[in-house]
Amino acid sequence: KKIYREDIESLIRNREISRGINILAVKGKAEDIVQSNNYQNPVIGLYIMKYFNNTERATSHAKQQVLGNMVKEIQNTNITTIPVIEKEEEGILKIGGAAVIKNYELVGWLDEDEVRGQLFIDGSIHKVPIVVEYEGDYLTYQIEHQKRTINFKRENELQTIVKIIVKGSITEYNSSKNQYVFNEEKIKEISKLIQQEIEREIEKTINTSKMMNIDFLNIGLEMHRKEPQLWKMYETNWDRDTYKKLPIQLNVEVMIQNTGILE
């Protein structure tokens, strides 16, 4: 904890290091990544930079973390997440999942699905494919736009309502039928399947955060910003047991804008 904090503070004081530099976590030794022969790009720093700067890349399994933002998150909530870079058996570098940091200490890891749920709640999903099984075949729906709102209400108990609206298109469906037409009824069926899959991913992330009892989804920060008076009532015990017991209602709406598919 002490060394990690000192390292971060030294990076901040160093004027030659940009606040926009990417921060990644490694399971194991960082030198194994730096010294790896990455065929995608032998200069590891360029590979990482191009990976996160590629606006055409789907934002699906890794949340970008830069030095300035990480410091801000730690200052605001004492919690941050850092994307993981690791070397697979074939020597290929892979970025996905996350390390969860609280009070400058590593407290756990998120897998790729849990990071995707985090991205949904952050409202930062981009060009993400959702694959569901429909009538015996796999169907791919690609999210083009996402809107997220988080609201709070207090009746008998505190409740959080997370509403997510996604818009996208069916991009692929290999049907074994000679003639297949998506009518209104079938579109509703497909929308329901996609909605259930998105809810499953987000609920997995919420359950993980509650099991850790670490609000890396920034629900408390959102309450502080939107409902400051309400936040004052729960701030003291938030990290103790309030967040862990907090009911979170999830509402997902799926809009299919186009069925230009491969049949």
Image (cartoon, rainbow, N blue to C red):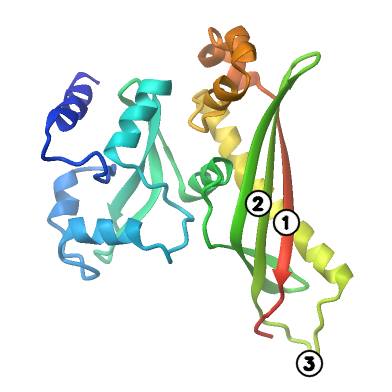
Q: Earlier in the sequence, mark 2 or mark 3?
A: 3
Confirm whether residue 224 shows in the render.
yes
User: In the rendering, at what x and y percent does residue 223 appear?
Assistant: 59, 23
Instruction: Name the spot of residue 239 as percent of width and height, x first.
Output: 51, 15
The circle on residue 178 is 3
Question: Label 3 amino acid?
Answer: Asn
Residue 14 left/right relative to 120:
left
Residue 27 seen in the figure: no
Q: Secondary structure at mark 1?
A: strand
Q: Which residue is mark 2?
A: 198
Front-lying residue, 19 or 95: 19
Which quadrant of the structure image shows residue 232?
top right
Nearer to us: label 2 or label 3: 2
* Observer-nearest of 148 and 91: 148
- Amino acid type shown at disc 1: Val
Tell me the distance, in whole angstroms, between the alpha carbons under discs 2 and 3.
30 Å
In the picture, the quarter occupied by the C terminus is bottom right
Q: Earlier in the sequence, mark 1 or mark 2?
A: 2
Dot 2: element: helix
Residue plotted at (53% across, 7% down) = 236
Of badges 1 and 2, nearer the viewer stands 1
Q: Do callouts 1 and 2 mark residues in contact (Cβ within 8 Å)? A: yes
Q: Earlier in the sequence, mark 1 or mark 3?
A: 3
